[in-house]
């Protein structure tokens, strides 16, 4: 009788467990199993965090630069004609009015990208300039140490004493990229323009000598 009672108790507990399992709602499926590819990797997340940090003092994405000739709320003024008989000489000191760019990063990039581009140019140029004989492997390591991941580094190759590279910095709908050269004595890093979407291509590579 004692053994039978113990068996009945175990059976009752099993029945309660089955009833509980049958009445409980199924656990929701996690999104990770269905969309793992949509979850950014740790390296990509760190890269985007670095982009945000570099551009933390810059305007929001999509901000257009205001014209210096016509500030907001002020209508542009017409050119002033000299009085009859007056001679027009060059401005003092031989200064000339700077030409307004019609193409390139100054025109095609928004205010955020232009601002962030200056920061990226400086941090990359200073780091690469420390290399006495910059080869592709050394340049890649410097870029990686600064937070630029391999998936965003392009055109890294050496021709003679010169190593060339480009960095895709497109983020939040921007078109920013960097175009750089280094030979141990001279390092040039300039902002460039890439397509908004699609494969990385430099729209306006600077002349490399």
Image (cartoon, rainbow, N blue to C red):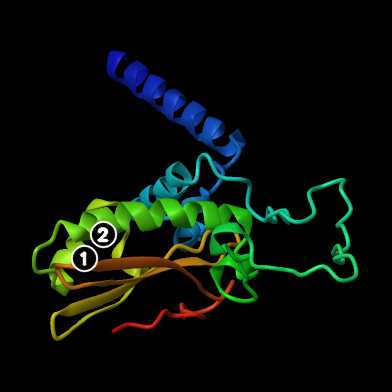
Q: Is residue 62 left or right of residue 45?
A: right
Q: Residue furthest front?
A: 85
Q: Residue under label 2, please give it.
A: 143
Q: CA distance from mark 1 to mark 2?
A: 5 Å
Q: Position of residue 59 (x, y in %)?
A: 61, 45
Nearer to me, 80 or 6: 80
Vertical relation: 154 (above or below) 139: below
Other-residue count near label 1 (Cα within 10 Å), few / some / many at <14 / 14–19 / ≥20: many
Q: Secondary structure at mark 1?
A: helix
Q: Position of residue 72 (x, y in %)?
A: 82, 47
Nearer to me, 140 or 101: 101
Q: Is residue 71 left or right of residue 207?
A: right
Could you tell me which residue is drawn at 43 percent across and 80 percent down?
205
**Count of number-bearing discs:** 2
Nearer to me, 8 or 73: 73
Q: Is residue 29 left or right of residue 179?
A: right
Residue 85 lies in quadrant = bottom right
Q: Which mark is residue 140?
A: 1
User: Is the N terminus in the top left, top right, bottom left or bottom right quadrant?
Assistant: top left
The reply to whether callout 1 and callout 2 are in contact (CB within 8 Å) is yes
Q: Position of residue 7 (x, y in %)?
A: 34, 24
Nearer to me, 43 or 160: 160
Q: Is residue 44 visible?
A: no
Could you tell me which residue is drawn at 21 percent across and 60 percent down?
128
Could you tell me which residue is drawn at 22 percent across and 81 percent down?
157
Q: Position of residue 29 (x, y in %)?
A: 53, 49
Q: Secondary structure at mark 2?
A: helix
């Amino acid at each position: 009788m004692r053994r039978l009672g113990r068996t009945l108790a175990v059976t009752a507990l099993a029945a309660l467990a089955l009833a509980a399992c049958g009445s409980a709602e199924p656990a929701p499926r996690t999104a990770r199993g269905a969309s793992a590819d949509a979850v950014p990797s740790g390296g990509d997340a760190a890269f985007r965090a670095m982009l945000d940090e570099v551009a933390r003092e810059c305007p929001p994405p999509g901000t257009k630069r205001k014209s210096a000739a016509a500030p907001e709320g002020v209508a542009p003024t017409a050119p002033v004609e000299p009085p009859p008989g007056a001679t027009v000489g060059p401005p003092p000191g031989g200064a000339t009015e700077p030409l307004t760019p019609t193409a390139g990063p100054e025109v095609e990039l928004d205010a955020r990208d232009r601002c962030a581009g200056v920061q990226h140019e400086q941090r990359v140029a200073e780091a690469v300039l420390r290399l006495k004989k910059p080869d592709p492997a050394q340049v890649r390591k410097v870029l990686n140490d600064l937070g630029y991941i391999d998936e965003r580094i392009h055109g890294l190759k050496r021709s003679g004493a010169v190593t060339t590279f480009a960095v895709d910095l497109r983020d939040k709908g921007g078109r920013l990229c960097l175009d750089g050269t280094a030979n141990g004595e001279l390092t040039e890093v300039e902002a460039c323009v890439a397509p908004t979407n699609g494969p990385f291509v430099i729209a306006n590579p600077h002349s490399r000598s």
